[in-house]
Amino acid sequence: MSLGLRIFLPFAGGYLLSYLLRNFNAVVAPELTRELGLSAADLGLLTSAYLLAFAAFQLPLGVLMDRYGPRRVQTVLLLVTAAGCALFALGTGIAQLTVARAAIGLGVSGCLMSSFTTFSRAFPTERLPSLNAAVMVAGGVGALAATTPLAWVMPMTGWRPLMLALSALSAAAAFAVFRSPEKATAATGETIGQQLRAVAGIMRSRVFWRYAPQAATAAGGFMAMQGLWAIPWLMVVDGQSREAAAFHLLLLTGAMTASLLALALFIVPLRRRGVSPGAVLAVAMGTGVAAMLAIVLGLAPSHFLWCLVGGAFACSNLAYSQLAGRFPQALAGRANTALNLAAFAGAFAIQWGYGAALDALATRGWSPVEAHRAAFGALVALQAAGYGWFLLGGRKAG
């Protein structure tokens, strides 16, 4: 096996597990709701605990990776993932399951950023957009597994044995990452305080704020829907069965994975032909927001629109290489994790807020269909605002 594959495959496997675990609750939500008696807000909070822990660890993650290296940090975090999955499988109440879900989110919080940081240190800059997209394809495979395949297997096994199996796979992934090659880099020589001040400098930079609002609303909103609320929307608003809704999610995720694969194959040739990754990002994000609006308004067949959403928002990962390229290599990990913080903080707020909105509107006498349309419409408005800032106000900042 080539050195490149020995570096790439362990990190890709970790990100595959990360995405599978992120979307796990979307399919098992009916069982969790029935077993624990959860409201929509409770379900949103339980599921988004993953996102909250994930987001909260992004800044220390970047500091730790730049100081100790992504391989060692990622190994420890995947062991935390294994422990969180085991705790979730054995949980008997909402408090224990919420803590376990948060532990899982903390454990997988480094899967993507450790990949990006490792690649930025081990490969030439011109290969990064392609490699970043390729590892996202692995995540897409994990997301695909958390749709129709999970819905098919779960009635035969139950969700607890599945979580125990994921615990074992997470431990195996930790071992694989630990054994992977790592390019030696010079120690930063900075104290933790100095590194945190460097992070603060990144977050104060104008170029960071070109990308952050869009990451929070567009990428974060997509994660919130894919990870939980897409299936309830399809079941309530479109009147579909869970199996049919899971198939929609399969199509969305398939389109997302196909788009990521296309990026991995064609982003470098497109750049050589004068089409920049930034231009691809701008067109794709606008397409995604338009498709979300069309879903709310029912302007086209739902299969087509959800596929369009998945394919378009898959391109949001291009923002990471665009942002990292504007900072010195030593700050690449912290720049990427700062942007990931924005995306996952937005995903947490949207995923929990969507459920809270459903409950609040229900108490005011709104029907479930009306409540879902209002919550989804508010999300689209946020995404449009973030996209507008990226194109207009953010352009001045860039």
Image (cartoon, rainbow, N blue to C red):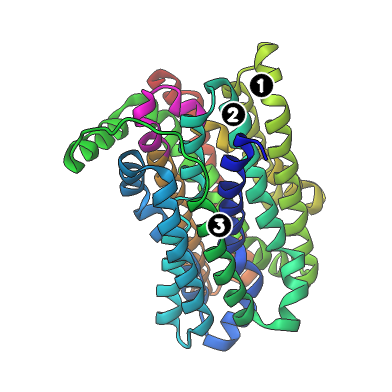
Determine the main secondary structure of the stretch shown in magenta.
Answer: helix
N-term-proximal mark, 3 vs 1: 3
Secondary structure of the residue carrying numbered label 2: helix
Mark 3 is on which residue type?
A: Ser
Name the image quarter holding the N terminus.
top right
For the question of whether residue 43 can be seen, the reply is yes
Q: Which residue occupies 71% across, 18% down?
A: 269
Q: Which residue occupies 52% across, 65% down?
A: 171
* Residue 224 percent coordinates (x, y): 55, 56
* Residue count near mark 1 (Cα–Cα under 10 Å), binned few <14, some 14–19, many ≥20: some
Secondary structure of the residue carrying numbered label 1: helix
Determine the CA span between mark 2 and mark 1. 7 Å
* Residue 91 percent coordinates (x, y): 48, 84
Q: How many marks?
A: 3
Q: Mark 2 points at which residue?
A: 129
Instruction: Give the magenta-colored segment's residue range.
Output: 321-336
Say left or right for 197 vs 71. Answer: left
N-term-proximal mark, 2 vs 3: 3
Secondary structure of the residue carrying numbered label 3: helix
Q: Are marks 2 and 1 in contact (CB under 8 Å)?
A: yes
Q: Name the residue under label 3.
A: 18
* Residue count near mark 2 (Cα–Cα under 10 Å), binned few <14, some 14–19, many ≥20: many
73 over 262 or under it: above or below: below
Q: Name the residue under label 1.
A: 268
Say left or right for 209 vs 250. Answer: left
